[in-house]
Structures are given as C-alpha cells and as structure tokens.
Image (cartoon, rainbow, N blue to C red):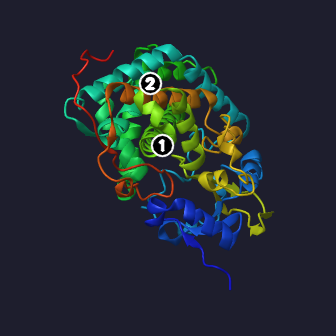
Amino acid sequence: MTPAPVPLSGPRFQAEPAVLYREMRREHGAVAPVLLDAGIPAWLVLGYRELHQVTSDPVLFSRDSGLWNRWEDVPDDWPLLPVIGRGQSSIIHTVGARHRERAAMVSAALETVDPYELRAHAERVADELIDTVCGDGSADLVTQYAMLLPVRVLARLYGFSEQQGPELVTALNDMIDGRERAIEGQRLLAASMARLLAERKKEPADDVVSRMLADENGFTDEEIVQDLMVMLAAGHQPTTDWIGNSLRLMLTDDRFAASLFGGRNSIAEAMNEVLWEDSPTQNVAGRWASRDIHLGGRHIRAGDLLLLGLQGANSDPQVRTDGSALTGGNNAHFSFGHGEHRCPWPAQELAEVIARTGIEVVLDRLPDIDLAVPEAELTRRSSPWLRGLTALPVTFTPTPAVGGPSA
C-alpha cells in the first residue's frame, strides 16, 4: 500500500520536525509527496544529493511558476500566493541572463555596505533594545529583542527612517506567518517600498535603494520594489530566528556554557550548528519541472512543484554518517540555498554580522543570563517554512542602561 501524502502543516513541524523528516524519508524516500494548503499537491525534496541536483539545474527545475500544472486548483485567497505567485517579477523568479543581471544588481548594492559601519550600527540598535529590558531582571529575547533587531538594521541600510521600523515589522510578520493576513502584509510592505523608491528617485542617498536605482540595466520600479521586498523578508525573519535559535542552544547546551561568561569562540560554533541542525529556513518553494523526469525514485511530471527541503537535506543520513558535518566550520549545509538562486554572498555576510553582533551584545549586557522556564516549555511557531521560537524568556541580574540614541 502506497503511503499517503504528508500534509505540510500541523503541530509536528513545531514540536518535532527532525523526527517528522526522518519518518518521511523512511516511508517515502528522498522525494516525498506532500499536501499544501487547500490540499494542493507538491513534492518535498529531502535528499542531500537530490536537492543538490535540483538547485544545480535551473533549466530542468525552473523558477518559472507559470509552468505549474495545478494553477486551476489554486483559490484566489490561497495564503501561499505571496510566496508562489503567477507572473511574479522578483529576482527569485527570473531565470537566465535576466536573473544574473538582477542578482548582480542586488549583490553590488549590498557589497558596498561597510562591514564595520554595519557592525557598529547593529551594536547600537542592539544596545538600545537591551536598554529597554536590562533593568527588569527578565525579558523575552524573541519578542523584545530578536524580532526587532534585524529589520531595524536592514531598514537603515535600505534608507528607511527609524520611525518606519514598527510598520515594517508588522507587515513582514503578517506576510511570513499570517496565513489569512499574508496577502495584506504583502500589500503593506509593497506600498512602503514604493514610497521609499519614489523618495530616493527624487533625492538619492548613500543607501541600498539608491544604489539599485543607479543600476544601468534598465530595471523597472516594479522589479526593484519586488527585489527589495524579497531582500527584506529573506533578511529579517531568518536572521531573527538565527539569533533566537543560537541563544537557545547556548543557554541549554553545556558545550557552549563558556560563552555565557565572557568567551567568544563558541558563538560561531553555535551559529554554525544551528544552520545544520535547527535551520531558520526549513523548506522553500519552489521549483517546477520543465519536463517529465525521475528524481529520487519518483516520477515527476512536467509542471509539478518541488519544494526544497533544506533541513531534511542537511540531516540526510547519507551525508551525515559520522556527524562530521558540524566540525571545522563546515558550511556545506543548504541553509542559504544552493546554485544560482541561493542567497547572495553579500546578503549572507550581512546576516551573519547582524546575528553574531546581536548574540554578543546579549552576552555582554545581561550577566548570569538563564532560561526562565524549563527547556521543554519553549515553543516554536507552527510553520513548515521557517523555524523559530515564539518566545525565549530569560532572567538575569538587573543592570543599568548604557543610554545614548542610535545613529
């Protein structure tokens, strides 16, 4: 009897995704049939080698959602439309030479960010956030810290004012997690980006948006707005979860105890382990088969949707037989994707600087920090796409604020 497709939803993605991925691999193999919202079928690629194949061949496994053979079954209010949309113009959906031009534009705009200035700004924002809680002796390091830090830093790089940060956080969280609010969140974020673009066309500045507008490849305003939305969404929530997941690991695993008392070497180790074992980006949509193909023992039809099972591939026992993947700073994980549509290198570097700075400031500013609840009581959001804590309550000895506005 053929095992039934697995619904890509439910509490197990919150409570035990690693166990669920193992079960899916055991029952279905490296490529598993799954059901999205409204019962829409897709394939989840769980095998490391199979995922490498899919992400290495953009012709056979296309980003063109117009190839999908299930569009007639998709309702107008489908909550995944902000992620899987027909005719979207963003960098993640373009292919070939046009994609390479847009990727080069994005990389060039991000490469000019001074890493020392970025770190200094991230540290100022982090200190400002810690100032609001350090005198209390307790805090939630997710809702009061990690959820606020990346978007404020990225907004500054793009050219937004500090005052616009809260509305961006709301729009992004609705777009990423909201389901029924996802389309509204996307609309609000697009409106904010369009306003900023109009402002910078009139008055350029030293920011990412102005540098993208100065590109000479003739991109439309709509294309640049779409790319800015993708960049901000991809940079905000995964970095937030990278901070939260790394802090959780360091607070609950004795191997990282030294870092809680002034050490620094194991911060990078904890962050790398999270990318292998507790990746903020678990699954990604998607690729569409341009013709019939066999993959991982499955017959994939032309137009079928394939989801990239990043965490499933990271934990594939075929490549993790001795646990060596976590040693020596090995970064052969899929947490930033792979192939020409992977997260651009400059964006990865920005995320790492923001996350590491955020963790270091917590450890510097909050002495004798400890979990306020047993580890078993920590909860994750119920999402198959992004994995992060809903809260990280901690206690510590109250300390005075350092003061001073962020630049």
Q: Please indicate whether residue 61 sits to the left or right of residue 65 in the image.
A: right
- Report the residue marked by disc 1: 254
Q: Position of residue 54 (x, y in %)?
A: 73, 52
Please give the residue where the numbered disc 2 appears in the rendered image: 158
Against 182, is 327 above or below? above
Q: Is residue 301 visible?
A: yes
Q: Is residue 154 left or right of residue 293?
A: left
Q: Residue at x 44, y 60 (%)?
A: 14
In the figure, 214 relative to 96: above or below? above
Q: Secondary structure at mark 2?
A: helix
Determine the residue located farthest toward the left in the rendered image.
Answer: 136
Q: Is residue 169 above or below residue 316?
A: above
Relative depth, front residue between 334 and 168: 334
Classify mark 1: helix, strand or loop. helix
Whole-angstrom CA distance, mark 1 to mark 2, is 39 Å
Question: Where in the figure is residue 359, as x and y percent of width and height?
Answer: 43, 31
Please report contact status of discs 1 and 2: CB closer than 8 Å, yes or no: no
- Is residue 281 left or right of 32 when viewed as pictured? left
How far across and down, in percent of the image, does residue 237 sit? 44, 41
Residue 124 falls in which quadrant of the image?
Answer: top left
Nearer the observer, 286 or 219: 286
As drawn, the label of residue 287 is none
Question: How many neighbours does mark 1 have within 10 angstroms: few (below 14), some (14-19), or many (20 or more)?
Answer: few
Residue at x 55% of width, y 52% of height: 282
* Residue at 33 percent of width and 48 percent of height: 391
Which quarter shows the C terminus?
top left
| Image point (44%, 13%), residue name | 205
Of mark 1 and mark 2, the one earlier in the sequence is 2
Tell me where residue 30 sits by quadrant: bottom right
Q: Amino acid at mark 1?
A: Asp
